[in-house]
Image (cartoon, grey):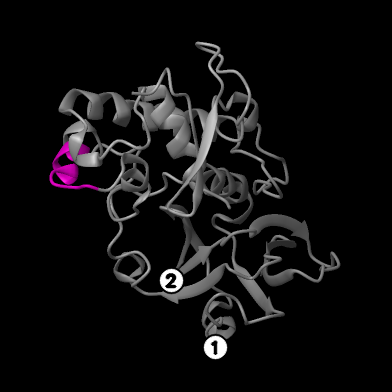
C-alpha cells in the first residue's frame, strides 16, 4: 500500500509535468472505484489550469479554478505521465489529458483508490479529521506525549492512527519504533516524555530518508516518474523476520498487531 513517502514521491514526480498546464479532456473508463467517481467532473474540469499539486496525508491534491481533485491511491494505485495516444491497460481507469500533449494516468488494479472534486478539500469528510503532518512544525514529542495521556492502546497502532498523526503507515511505524528503541507492544500512555521526543525525531528521520530514496517498493509501487523506490534496501526490521538485527545480532521477531504484521528486535526495543 502506498504510504506517505510513496505519495510524496508520486507528487514530486508528476508536478513538473502538470503544474500550470491546462486540462483538456478527462477520460473515465471505470467509475467504480472505492467510491464512484462523481458524474459531471469531466465537464467541470475541462479547460481548467492546474494551479498547484499538493499532498495531505496520503491524498494528492490537484488544485484548479473549478475545485481541487482529491486523489487517493488506495492499496495498489499509481499515477504516471504518458503521451496522448498511449494505449491504456485494463487497470488504467482515468486519464487527464493536458494541453502539452501529455496525460496524467491513474492506474489501480484493485480499485481501492478514489477520485473526488471539492471546493474546500481540507473540509472534505476524508480530510477534515486528520492529524498533523509528521514533517511539519506542529508535530513533535510534546504533541505525541499530550495525545497519548491515558491511552492504553499499544504505541504502534497509536502512531498509525491518522487522527493522531498522518502518514505513519505500517512499514514506517515499525522502522521508527526500532530507531527510537521502543517496543511496539508498550502502551502509548506508558511511554515517557523524553522517549516521545526520540520517537518524533525518528519518525521525521525515517520518512525523510524514505522520500529521498523514492519510497519503498514491496510489491507494485512506482513513483510518478515510473521509477521504483529504493528505501527497502535500508529497512532494519520490517519484513526481516528470522534475520539477525544489524545492531545486536538478535533474531528479528514478528507478530500480528491490529491485523498488521509488526517487526521488532527484542534486545534493541524496550
Placement of 160 over or under 38, stated as above or below: above
Placement of 136 over or under 2, stated as above or below: above
Residue located at (52% from left, 66% from top) = 49
Residue 144 on image: x %, y %: 22, 39
Closer to the camera in the image, 233 or 236: 236
Quadrant location of the C terminus in the rendered image = top left
Q: Secondary structure at mark 2?
A: loop
Which residue lies under the disc numbered 2? 65
Instruction: Find out whether the residues at labels 1 and 2 contact each other: C-beta distance under 8 Å.
Output: no
| Residue 171 seen in the figure | yes
Residue located at (55% from left, 75% from top) = 34
Left or right of residue 98: residue 195 = left
For the residues carrying marks 1 and 2, which lies nearer the camera in this image? 1
Tell me the magenta residue range: 143-152
Which residue lies under the disc numbered 1? 40
Characterize the magenta stretch by its predominant secondary structure: helix
Q: Secondary structure at mark 1?
A: loop
- Total numbered labels placed on residues in the image: 2
Placement of 195 over or under 224, stated as above or below: above
Closer to the camera in the image, 192 or 11: 192
| Residue 66 seen in the figure | no
Closer to the camera in the image, 189 or 140: 189
Amino acid at each position: 500500500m502506498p504510504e506517505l513517502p510513496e505519495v510524496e514521491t508520486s507528487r514530486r514526480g508528476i508536478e513538473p509535468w502538470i503544474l500550470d498546464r491546462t486540462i483538456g479532456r478527462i477520460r473515465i473508463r471505470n467509475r467504480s472505484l472505492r467510491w464512484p467517481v462523481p458524474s459531471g467532473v469531466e465537464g467541470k474540469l475541462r479547460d481548467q489550469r492546474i494551479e498547484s499539486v499538493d499532498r495531505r496525508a496520503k491524498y494528492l491534491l490537484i488544485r484548479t479554478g473549478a475545485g481541487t481533485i482529491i486523489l487517493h491511491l488506495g492499496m495498489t494505485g499509481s499515477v504516471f505521465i504518458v503521451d496522448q495516444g498511449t494505449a491504456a491497460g485494463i487497470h488504467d481507469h482515468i486519464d487527464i489529458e493536458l494541453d502539452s500533449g501529455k496525460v496524467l494516468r491513474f492506474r489501480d488494479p484493485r480499485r481501492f483508490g478514489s477520485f473526488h472534486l471539492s471546493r474546500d478539500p481540507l473540509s472534505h469528510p476524508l480530510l477534515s479529521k486528520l492529524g498533523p503532518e509528521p514533517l511539519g512544525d506542529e508535530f513533535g514529542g510534546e504533541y505525541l506525549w499530550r495525545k497519548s495521556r491515558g491511552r492504553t492502546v499499544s504505541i504502534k497502532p497509536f502512531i498509525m492512527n491518522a487522527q493522531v498523526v498522518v502518514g505513519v503507515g505500517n512499514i514506517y511505524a515499525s522502522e521508527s519504533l526500532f530507531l527510537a528503541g521502543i517496543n511496539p507492544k508498550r502502551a502509548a500512555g506508558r511511554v515517557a516524555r523524553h522517549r516521545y521526543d526520540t520517537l518524533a525525531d525518528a519518525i521525521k528521520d525515517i520518512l525523510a530518508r524514505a522520500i529521498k530514496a523514492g519510497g519503498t517498493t514491496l510489491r507494485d509501487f512506482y513513483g510518478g516518474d515510473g521509477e521504483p523506490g529504493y528505501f527497502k534496501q535500508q529497512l532494519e526490521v520490517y519484513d526481516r523476520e528470522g534475520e539477525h538485527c544489524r545492531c545486536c545480532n538478535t533474531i528479528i521477531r514478528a507478530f500480528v498487531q491490529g491485523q498488521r504484521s509488526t517487526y521488532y528486535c527484542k534486545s534493541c526495543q524496550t
